[in-house]
Amino acid sequence: MDAQTTARPIPVEFTGSGGVRLVGDQWETDDRPTDSTEGTVLLLHGGGQTRHSWDRTAARLAEGGWRAVTFDARGHGDSEWAPEYSAELFAADLEAVLADLGGRVVVVGASLGGRTGIVVAGERPRSLAGLVLVDITHRIDRTGQRRVRDFLGAAPNGFASLDDASAAIDAFRGTPPRRRRSDGLRKNLRLRVHLKTPGWVTPCGRVGVTWSRSWRCRPSLRDGRAASRSRGRNAGVYRSTRRSARPPTDGEEP
């Protein structure tokens, strides 16, 4: 976080589909604690990330007069784990948050967040004031998608240290190793301390102290057939809604 920023996060909570508790932040400045001059912007993180990936951006937007809001998707960060995850449920959570915020909101979504925004924009084209996509488009390159999925699933038992996690990121990017600030990794990973007693090992962690990604590991999706059905259902939802989503034409109010 920029030490010179005048913005600060105020903790907020939302209730998603099925009553799932979603934890977020609303960014404010000392001279503009509640009002905004530009409108409301909601920033959605990518899969395996948390709301903190948008901290700097949200602070800048708040300083610029926006009401900037972030939240952890279900099963991510500080939000509640859920019994089920799907494109429909992520979209339903987003709709619940939009209803809570009120008015028309600009949604900025990275990767999974952008995909969720596309689903909502396709189902309810007039529900958003605008949609900004980061690291995703309305059409997905399947090779790149598989590469990202393989990376996210490459360490199901977590990492022994933050240095190991950093090395895995460098290998995925194909860049020379570099030093990273540990506080950034700590916001996207969770330290799991497992007792060496049967029954105390979580689905995402091995015995001992490990760093694991911040979403819940879903044992049912380890079964190849279950994972295939889930991906197929999500892809169907995405294809059907993206055809409905369209940008406004010249002279048309968004």
Image (spheres, grey):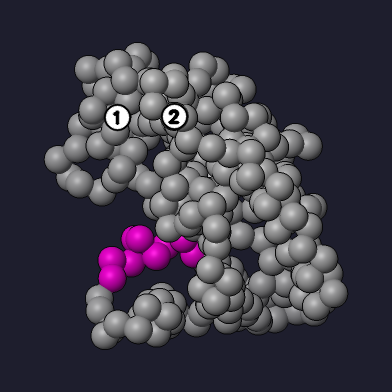
For mark 1, give the secondary structure: helix
Is 2 located above or below residue 11 in the figure? below
Residue 62 at x, y percent in the picture: 29, 29
Range of residues picked out in magenta: 180-190
Residue at point 48%, 35% (across, down):
247
Say whether residue 80 is left or right of residue 38: right
User: Can you identify the residue that label 1 sits on?
Assistant: 62
Residue 121 at x, y percent in the picture: 59, 36
Q: Main secondary structure of the magenta part?
A: helix
User: Can you identify the residue that label 2 sits on?
Assistant: 249
Residue kind at label 1, given as amino acid type: Ala
Say whether residue 52 is left or right of residue 94: left
**Residue in the foreground of this view, choosing between 143 and 26:** 143
Residue at point 49%, 54% (across, down):
137
Question: Residue lying furthest left in this view?
Answer: 4
Is 41 located above or below residue 117 in the figure? above
User: Can the viewer see residue 46 in this picture?
Assistant: no
Query: Of the numbered discs in the image, which one, if any, rests on residue 238?
Result: none
Question: Residue lying furthest front in this view?
Answer: 250
